Image (cartoon, rainbow, N blue to C red):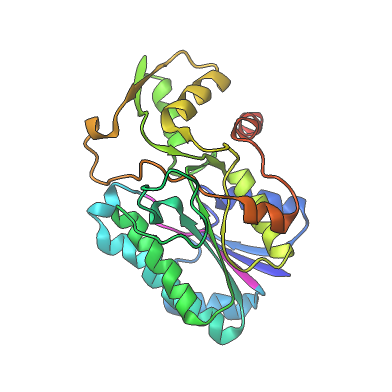
Amino acid sequence: MKIMILGSGGTLGKDFINILKQKRENFYAYTKEQLNILNLERLNKAIDEVKPDTIINCAGYTKVDMAEIEKDKAFSVNALAVFNLAKICREKGIFLTYISTDYVFSGEKTSPYHPFDTASPLNYYGLSKLYGENYIRDSGCDYLIVRTSWLYGTEGNNFFLKLLEKSESKDEITVETDQISSPTSTITLSKTIIALLNKGGRGIYNITDRTKNGISLYTFAKKIMEVFERKTVIKGVKSSELLRPAKRPSYSVLDIEATEFIIGERLPYWEVSLGEMKRRM
């Protein structure tokens, strides 16, 4: 299998490359600077040069609050570029993998979301990702859509890195107690996507670290401080107190049973993944 990775310089991309190297997979990786997915002509040319069997699109607009302001930019990257990419994949017979989000859901459930639960995003970031999903599904290409939540790693724009950075200069940090979901390390996501592809996974799957029925963002933050031996105090607050531009679902835990069934193994517990992330830093 020849793999082409788009957006290899972001939160997910670099760990993806490390995992592919470990597994000795045949792959070609492109950062945003090397290949901007908004450049349709350049994208077509690169795909013709590589002739991949599979394209994994790690490129995405992930600034949840800014998406409420930069709607055109979020839509261009998360939806319009994906529309064009799906069309190319259908025409050339290439399998497409797309990374989506738990934010396609409203958070009204009290039990984990299944892959085919009705999507109803609360914010524009989630809406732009849902458009991307729908464009792929309607395109007729062969695809794998992966929904994940609270993705964190050693690169890019993510809660984990921001918290560690703040803890270097602040004695106290406020974090929401009423947002419940599951953290996902880039290592878990990379390994599991590759496992799904090797097992012939198709359609929509959820990938997160295991949390049983979810944890709060506050609990996640407290554990990060503990694992990284930081003295910063984490103060719990309600989401309504922070007055952020984008609404977040209060509950967005994703059901990972179908994923575990297909790959034939359990995904790691979130505490284990956090410890592994520390060892890699």
Please state the horizontal and vertical placement of residue 106, each as a whole percent of the image.
Answer: 35, 51
Q: Outermost residue toward the bottom?
A: 91
Place residue 6 in its image quadrant: bottom right
Q: Is residue 169 above or below residue 280?
A: above
Residue 171 painted magenta? no
Please state the horizontal and vertical placement of residue 223, each as a whole percent of the image.
Answer: 52, 24
User: The C terminus appears in which quarter of the rendering?
Assistant: top right
Residue under the image location 43 percent in, 32 percent down: 217
Residue under the image location 29 percent in, 29 percent down: 238
Residue numbers of the magenta segment: 54-62
Residue under the image location 39 percent in, 56 percent down: 104
Please state the horizontal and vertical placement of residue 128, each as a whole percent of the image.
Answer: 35, 62
Place residue 74 in its image quadrant: bottom left
User: The N terminus appears in which quarter of the rendering?
Assistant: bottom right
Q: Is residue 116 above or below residue 48?
A: above
Residue 58 painted magenta? yes
Q: Outermost residue toward the right?
A: 24
Q: Is residue 44 above or below residue 234?
A: below
Q: Name the foreground residue: 255 vs 170.
A: 255
Please state the horizontal and vertical placement of residue 264, each as a whole percent of the image.
Answer: 75, 53
Q: Is residue 96 left or right of residue 167?
A: right
